[in-house]
Image (spheres, rainbow, N blue to C red):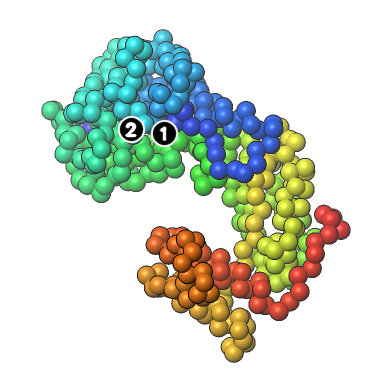
């Protein structure tokens, strides 16, 4: 297949209506940024399209909820789309769950170069330059319960490079035909390439992670197509706030000074690697013995969190420690005498964890006078994930309370 080389930008899940969330404490210097980060990231997406001089832009859904974003969000988006229109860059927008085409306010006219795909059918557009055709872009907005079907994206004439824009879950059948070259998908906040041959099936992820679970770099995808139809994708980072999960294990016998040194070293390295993003870090320390119990059962974790915030949050851009938590490095009955109460307890926890469908029967541990209490309803753990989480937390609690070692009270940082 011989075609004219071209480039386009693929972005999705901008969610201009949704600020950052999931942190119990937000420092004053980051409050405005938590509100503005989605727009900052989105503006960087449009900046990239202009700076790279792309031939067109594909938006694969969940750009914004018009009602929840309100007039400021709508005005922002129209201004950004207007920038692309003025530079002759076409935009192809396949709606998602928050931005179906029928939800857009009728009184707000989109620029002529913005093409919104309908929900009822797949619509086709040909992208041309003065020297001829570049590609065909097809798309539709999803209906509730509707899957993405490769059979819906068969062009009337074969040949050329076809980009299919859609929102939803990618099935294995999307690569069954050779009529689509690039599936530009939305509906995932994490970046992922599902397949790269014979067709590229790609989610660019959200330009800005919204919560601690959405870790790592976020951005949009610059797609370059060569004369033979070969496709190359490149992540362009746009996030203003980056969520980071730092997880490390302390060796047996480690003390508080060892932990402080590890924390300082890791956050220093994170700070040195900053490229315009503020970092929000959640530290998980894997530690057994006395230090582990101190972190889980005393105020030590909170003291260290406050210390890290004082040490690193004042930088610009800064590193903010959202949480410091501790988990046991090992939860194994084999570490303790076989006939000990703790070993029996951990074996029981392990049995319940290995049998997620087995009833816990927690009611039998309640005094008879409390069985009629309405709070007994919480003991019926129907949700499997919640049940497993509680079993694991119970194992950690038993490890701390039944290990038979005293827990020292923490002293001041650096003591």
Q: Is residue 388 visible?
A: no
Q: Are marks 2 and 1 in contact (CB under 8 Å)?
A: yes
What residue did someone put label 1 on? 13
Q: Nearer the viewer, residue 114 or 223?
A: 114
Question: Can you identify the residue that label 2 sits on?
Answer: 96
Is 273 located above or below residue 264 in the figure?
Answer: above
Quick one: quadrant of the C terminus?
Answer: bottom right
Quarter of the picture holding the N terminus = top left
Percent x, y of residue 109? 34, 11
Name the residue nearer the viewer: 17 or 46. Answer: 17
Residue at 61%, 69% (x, y): give it. 397
Q: CA distance from mark 2 to mark 1?
A: 8 Å
**Residue lying at 67% horizontally and 66% vertically, measured from the top left:** 287
Please tell me whether mark 2 sits on a helix, a strand or a loop.
loop
For the residue pair 165 and 379, the one nearer the viewer reads as 379
| Residue 28 drawn at (x, y percent) | 69, 32
Residue at image position (23%, 40%) is 146
Placement of 70 over or under 273, stated as above or below: above
Q: Which quadrant of the structure image shows residue 342?
A: bottom right
Q: Is residue 212 visible?
A: yes
Secondary structure category for the residue under label 1:
loop
Tell which residue pokes out farthest to the left in this image.
156
């Amino acid at each position: 297949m011989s075609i004219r080389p071209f480039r386009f930008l693929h972005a999705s899940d901008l969610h201009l209506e949704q600020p950052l969330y999931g942190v119990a404490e937000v420092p004053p210097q980051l409050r405005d940024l938590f509100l503005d980060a989605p727009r900052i990231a989105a503006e960087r997406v449009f900046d990239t399209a202009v700076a790279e001089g792309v031939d067109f832009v594909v938006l694969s859904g969940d750009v914004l909820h018009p009602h929840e974003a309100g007039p400021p969000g709508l005005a922002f988006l129209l201004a950004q789309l207007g920038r692309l229109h003025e530079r002759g860059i076409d935009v192809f927008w396949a709606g998602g769950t928050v931005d179906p085409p029928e939800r857009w306010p009728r009184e707000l006219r989109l620029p002529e170069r913005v093409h919104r795909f309908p929900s009822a059918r797949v619509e086709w557009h040909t992208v041309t330059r003065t020297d001829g055709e570049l590609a065909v872009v097809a798309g539709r907005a999803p209906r509730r319960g509707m899957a993405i079907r490769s059979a819906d994206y068969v062009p009337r004439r074969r040949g050329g490079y076809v980009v299919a824009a859609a929102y939803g879950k990618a099935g294995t059948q999307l690569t069954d035909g050779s009529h689509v070259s690039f599936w530009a998908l939305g509906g995932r906040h994490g970046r992922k390439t599902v397949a790269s041959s014979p067709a590229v099936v790609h989610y660019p992820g959200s330009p800005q992670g919204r919560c601690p679970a959405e870790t790592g770099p976020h951005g949009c995808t610059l797609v370059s197509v060569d004369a033979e139809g070969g496709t190359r994708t490149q992540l362009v980072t746009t996030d203003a706030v980056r969520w980071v999960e730092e997880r490390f294990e302390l060796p047996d016998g480690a003390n508080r000074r060892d932990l402080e040194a590890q924390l300082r070293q890791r956050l220093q390295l994170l700070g040195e690697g900053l490229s315009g993003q503020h970092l929000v870090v959640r530290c998980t320390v894997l530690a057994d013995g006395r230090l582990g119990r101190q972190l889980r059962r005393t105020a030590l974790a909170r003291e260290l969190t406050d210390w890290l915030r004082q040490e690193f949050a004042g930088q610009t851009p800064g590193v903010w420690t959202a949480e410091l938590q501790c988990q046991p490095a090992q939860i194994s009955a084999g570490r303790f005498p076989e006939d000990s109460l703790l070993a029996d307890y951990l074996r029981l926890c392990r049995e319940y964890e290995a049998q997620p469908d087995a009833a816990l029967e927690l009611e039998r541990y309640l005094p008879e006078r409390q069985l009629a209490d309405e709070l007994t309803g919480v003991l019926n753990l129907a949700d499997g994930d919640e049940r497993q989480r509680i079993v694991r937390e119970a194992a950690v609690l038993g490890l701390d309370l039944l290990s038979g070692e005293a827990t020292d009270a923490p002293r001041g940082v650096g003591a």
